[in-house]
Image (cartoon, grey):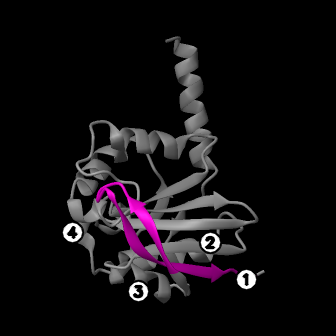
Amino acid sequence: MREGSRLDDLDAAAAGALSQPVIRTDRFTLRPLRRSDAGMIAHYTADRRVAEGTRAIPHPLPPGASDSFVARALAADRAEDVWAIDGSDHKLAELLGVVSLTRMEDARSELGFWIGAGFWNTGFATEAVAALVAANPHGSRTLFAEAFQDNPGSARVLTNCGFVYLGDAESWSVARGARVPTWTYLRRMAG
């Protein structure tokens, strides 16, 4: 590989990350992912309970999966913006979990999040989702989200942040290797 092309790739990743705003809350900062986050992402998502709470995280986590996830999150042409929930400025862990927005058509975005199991029931997920909703970095008119029906904690996060129940559906969970019943939520944004 030519050194110039490697530098170009790094510049493209940095430019992509710079297009995401940094969002501060009382207990942490939402910031673009860094390559150095891959190890903690692998650590947290190796927990079956975390993986099974998502659609896309496999269990067991294959080698290199978290590095690939971070690389996609840093790509200049990505459809999904991913923020690390970083508590290091407040004497908490550097990575508590992630929150994301995926661009959809018609000024809509889909919100997703997961929190490391050691930080469940701390209010971190609600605080992160509320901060991202308030910032509305995609300028979305509507946000969508879903929660697996066997995960009422995630549903509470959404309703606490102004999402309203839209209906039942189902989504494939890679970790479970099965379709899982979901609740779908919507949040109309001001403007």
Magenta stretch in the rendered image:
168-190
Q: CA distance from mark 2 to mark 1?
A: 11 Å
Q: Residue at x 59, y 32 (%)?
A: 11
User: Residue 181: where, in percent of width, then height?
Assistant: 40, 74
Q: Which residue is mark 4?
A: 118
Q: CA distance from mark 4 to mark 2?
A: 27 Å
Q: Secondary structure at mark 3?
A: helix
Q: Nearer the viewer, residue 143 or 33?
A: 143
User: Residue 64: where, in percent of width, then height?
Assistant: 32, 36
Q: Quadrant of residue 96?
A: bottom left
Q: Secondary structure at mark 1?
A: loop
- Which circle, 3 or 1, is nearer the viewer? 3
Q: Is residue 167 above or below residue 28?
A: below
- Which circle, 2 or 1, is nearer the viewer? 1
Please tell me whether residue 178 belongs to the stretch shown in magenta: yes
Residue 135's disc number:
2
Q: Is residue 44 above or below residue 183?
A: above
Answer with mark 2 or mark 1, whichever residue precedes in sequence. Answer: 2
CB of mark 3 within 8 Å of CB of mark 1?
A: no
Q: Which residue is mark 3?
A: 156
Q: Which residue is mark 1?
A: 190
User: Residue 1: where, in percent of width, then height?
Assistant: 49, 12
